[in-house]
């Protein structure tokens, strides 16, 4: 079974210190999309802010769905239940990428494969390893 990948937005795709979208992460998203891997944006960030940044750099086109956590923000367990429901697959087929260790730990409690974001190169290496072992 192939994997679906859910990405956080803040401090992963969006770099607050520069107020811009990370082009290296965009390249990773584009590559994954070309491989036919379903991608999801899973964020506590407001829909208005995400849409405003998307007008500067069209990144939402890479995602099958955007999951905004208004009612139950991460690290609330209900947010991760919502992720599983929206992806529509078993947790072991979902890869979740986030910079916050607490979110990684909660995701893992659900059986989701979780990667702590440490930078684009590390992310690429870890995703390659997971996807290579998926065959």
Image (cartoon, helix red, strand yellow):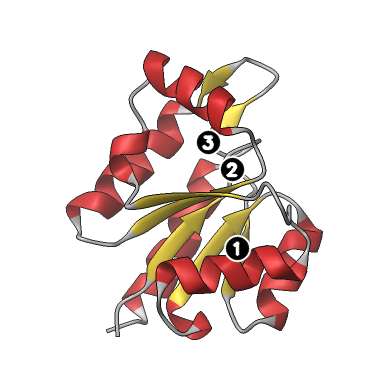
Whole-percent x and y of residue 99?
Answer: 69, 49
Q: Which mark is residue 58?
A: none
* Quarter occupied by residue 24: top left
Determine the CA span between mark 1 and mark 2: 11 Å
Under circle 1, the secondary element is strand
Q: Which mark is residue 115?
A: 1
Mark 3, other Cα within 10 Å: few <14 / some 14–19 / many ≥20: many
Residue occupying the point 50% across, 63% down: 126
Whole-percent x and y of residue 129?
Answer: 42, 71
Residue occupying the point 55% across, 33% down: 47
Front disc: 3 or 1: 3
Foreground pick, 92 / 50? 50
Which residue is tagged 2?
119
Which residue is tagged 3?
13
Residue occupying the point 30% across, 43% down: 62
Mark positioned earlier in the residue sequence (2 or 3) = 3
Answer with left or right where residue 132 lies relative to residue 100.
left
* Quarter occupied by residue 2: bottom left
Residue occupying the point 81% across, 61% down: 102
């Amino acid at each position: 079974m192939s994997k679906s990948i859910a990405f956080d937005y803040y401090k992963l795709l969006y770099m607050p210190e520069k107020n811009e979208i990370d082009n290296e992460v965009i390249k990773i998203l584009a590559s994954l999309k070309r491989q036919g891997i379903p991608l999801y944006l899973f964020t506590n960030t407001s829909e208005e802010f995400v849409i405003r940044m998307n007008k500067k750099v069209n990144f939402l086109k890479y995602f099958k769905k955007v999951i905004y956590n208004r009612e139950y923000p991460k690290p609330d367990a209900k947010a991760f239940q919502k992720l599983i429901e929206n992806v529509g697959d078993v947790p072991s087929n979902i890869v979740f990428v986030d910079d916050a260790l607490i979110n990684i730990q909660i995701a893992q409690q659900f059986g989701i494969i979780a990667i702590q974001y440490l930078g684009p190169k590390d992310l690429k290496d870890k995703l390659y390893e997971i996807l290579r072992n998926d065959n």
